[in-house]
Amino acid sequence: MRESIPGLVAGHFRRGDDYSVRRPEGADSWLLAYTLGGRGYFRTPAEQSSCSEGDLILLRKDVAHEYGTAKGEQWHFMWCHFARLPHTGLLPEKELLNVPLSGTFRRRALRSFRLLLQDARERGAYGLLRCENHLGALLLLAASQLGDRVDPRVAAVLRVLASRMEEELRIEDLARIAALSPSRLSHLFKEQTGRTILETLAEMRLEQAALLLAHAGRLPSEAAAEVGFRSYNHFAALFRRRFGVSPSAYRTDSARLSEGDFQRLT
């Protein structure tokens, strides 16, 4: 079963060991997969992982990859290709992330994926927004499950960045939240996430701005202000560097993330 709306395609598969997908050039989308039973595998140039019941896999966009059913197995899984969400900034910056869910997290993941598949049948902005909410919930589940692997002070700062990105956040204020000196927080954050605090905040803001431009009808200046950029020129320069086009061009060219572009992903 597969459901799709512009910018998102999701499905629920049972596949034998003849199932495999190879994309040497990667894909212009993220992939989230949740295993319900059996066993599958994922490979990228830097990572490889098997997945079994309760495993939530996140594969980054633009990364060469292969995935499929493990030899001699059946693989029962739900999946979703999606354009982008700011919640990905809460997770480690790896090509491939496998998060084994436990207890109530499994039940919540199953519920969110079922709702995602249901809402993907609805055309229009409201269906997409609900799907993005379900995806956000799944990514937050992964971040919560990984919480014990990430220093709690860094996790606290990540939560603040995601929930208050539109505010003028200073390193000194974040350091007080983490009960660390600004220099110690900056070092620990980079060590744990692979990026600086300012890089992470800018990435979250840009991802959210792209969503507002493509799906919420915002003008570029409105999107920039809504996510926390004080200078439109600075926003436009970062946006072009990140997405390869100006905010205005991205808004008018959002058809590149249409349903047709996602049909080839399965």
Image (cartoon, rainbow, N blue to C red):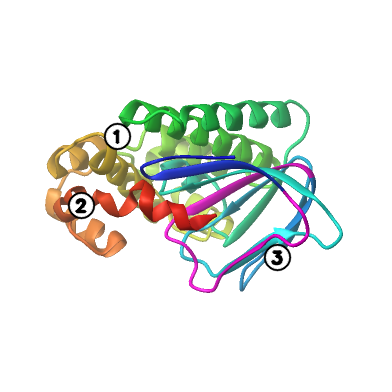
Q: Please determine whether, in this image, residue 145 is positioned above or below residue 210.
A: above
The image position of residue 137, as x and y in percent, is 54, 31
Q: For residue 35: magenta?
A: yes
The residue range painted magenta reads 15-37
Q: Is residue 147 above or below residue 250?
A: above
Circle 3 sits in a helix, a strand or a loop, which is it?
Answer: strand
Magenta highlight on residue 16: yes
The Cα atoms of the two marked residues, 2 and 1, are separated by 15 Å
Q: Are marks 1 and 3 in contact (CB under 8 Å)?
A: no
Residue at x-position 46% and y-position 65%: 62
Q: Secondary structure at mark 1?
A: loop
Of circles 2 and 1, the one toward us is: 2
Residue 133 position within the rendered picture, expressed as x and y whole percent measured from the top left: 46, 30
Task: Report, in whole angstroms, how far the alpha carbon at label 1 lies from the one at label 3.
Answer: 38 Å
Q: Position of residue 5 (x, y in %)?
A: 40, 39
Q: Quadrant of the C terminus?
A: bottom right
Q: As shown in the figure, which amino acid type bears the numbered disc 3? A: Gln
Relative horizontal placement of residue 247, taking residue 187 as reference (left or right): left
Name the amino acid type tagged 2: Phe
**Observer-nearest of 116 and 218:** 116
Q: Which residue is mark 1?
A: 167
Name the residue tied to disc 3: 48
Task: Tell me the SS state at disc 2.
Answer: helix
Query: What is the three-letter code of the residue carrying label 1?
Result: Glu
Residue 4: horizontal and vertical position, in percent? 45, 40
For residue 183, above or below residue 166? below
Residue 259 in sight here: yes
Q: Where is mark 2, residue-wise? A: 235
Which label belongs to residue 120?
Answer: none
First in sequence, mark 2 or 1: give its number.
1
Point 14% across, 51% down: residue: 248
Q: How dense is the environment of label 1, judged by Cα within 10 Å: few (below 14), some, or many (20 and up)?
A: some
